[in-house]
Amino acid sequence: MLLEVGRIDKPHGLRGEVVVRFTTNNLDRVKPGARLESEQGTLVVVAARRHNERWIVRFEGFADRNAAEALRGLVLRAEPGPRGDELWVHELIGSTVVEVDGTVRGTVIAVVDNPASDLLELDSGALVPLTFVTDQTRPGRIVVDVPAGLFDDAEDEPKDDRPRRRASS
């Protein structure tokens, strides 16, 4: 199974480089020789350097800006990397969220990007910051320890247009 690991935003400069926004903390994805899959086939990293919150990447076979323009907007995918203690988005979707006292709070339908902490969006309408997850050792079950009142008005809150991630590593 391939996971979404980033997206090419736009060309950068005249030498075939592109700006990539990665959704992974696995730096093996930007090492020379790394292979990333896209709708245009396999892209091989030649060079990469950090640029603020994004990366400037040059892929094999793309030597000028015109060639790089063809990569604009491509989603990059890769095999899951080695697993540590990280939470993987594709494993969170569909999980039941339970408080430490055993109260079931709903099912995760999306993970919402948020600068302070990504949020679990539940089918009940509640948004739970990932920082409150205390256990995810049983498949399909996430235990959270949230402050009092977090779930009080979940049904009354309006939905918004924040970007959601369905699966990435």
Image (cartoon, rainbow, N blue to C red):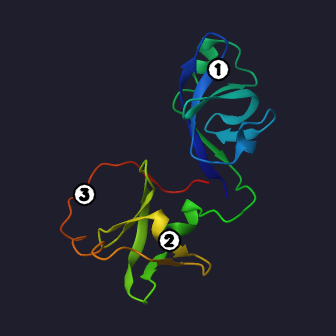
Label 1 SS: strand
Lower sequence index among marks 2 and 1: 1
Question: Would you name the residue on which mark 1 appears?
Answer: 17
Residue name at image x 60 percent, y 24 percent = 18
Q: Residues within 10 Å of mark 2 (few under 14, many from 20)?
A: some
Lower sequence index among marks 1 and 3: 1
Amino acid type for the residue under numbered disc 3: Lys
Depth check, mark 2 against mark 1: the one in front is 2
Residue name at image x 47 percent, y 64 percent = 130
**Rendered location of residue 153, percent (x, y):** 21, 71
Q: Residues within 10 Å of mark 1 (few under 14, many from 20)?
A: many
Residue name at image x 31 percent, y 69 percent = 126
**Rendered location of residue 65, percent (x, y):** 61, 13
Task: Name the residue furthest front.
Answer: 147
Spatial CA distance of label 3 from label 2 is 22 Å
Label 3–label 2 contact, CB within 8 A: no
Label 1–label 3 contact, CB within 8 A: no
**91 horizontally vs 33: left or right:** left
Residue 40 has which mark? Answer: none
**160 horizontally vs 28: left or right:** left
Amino acid type for the residue under numbered disc 1: Glu
Q: Quadrant of residue 135?
A: bottom right
Question: Would you name the residue on which mark 2 appears?
Answer: 133
Question: Would you name the residue on which mark 3 appears?
Answer: 159
Amino acid type for the residue under numbered disc 2: Val
Quadrant in the picture for the N terminus: bottom right
Task: Name the residue furthest right.
Answer: 33
Lower sequence index among marks 3 and 2: 2
Label 2 SS: strand
Spatial CA distance of label 2 from label 1 is 38 Å
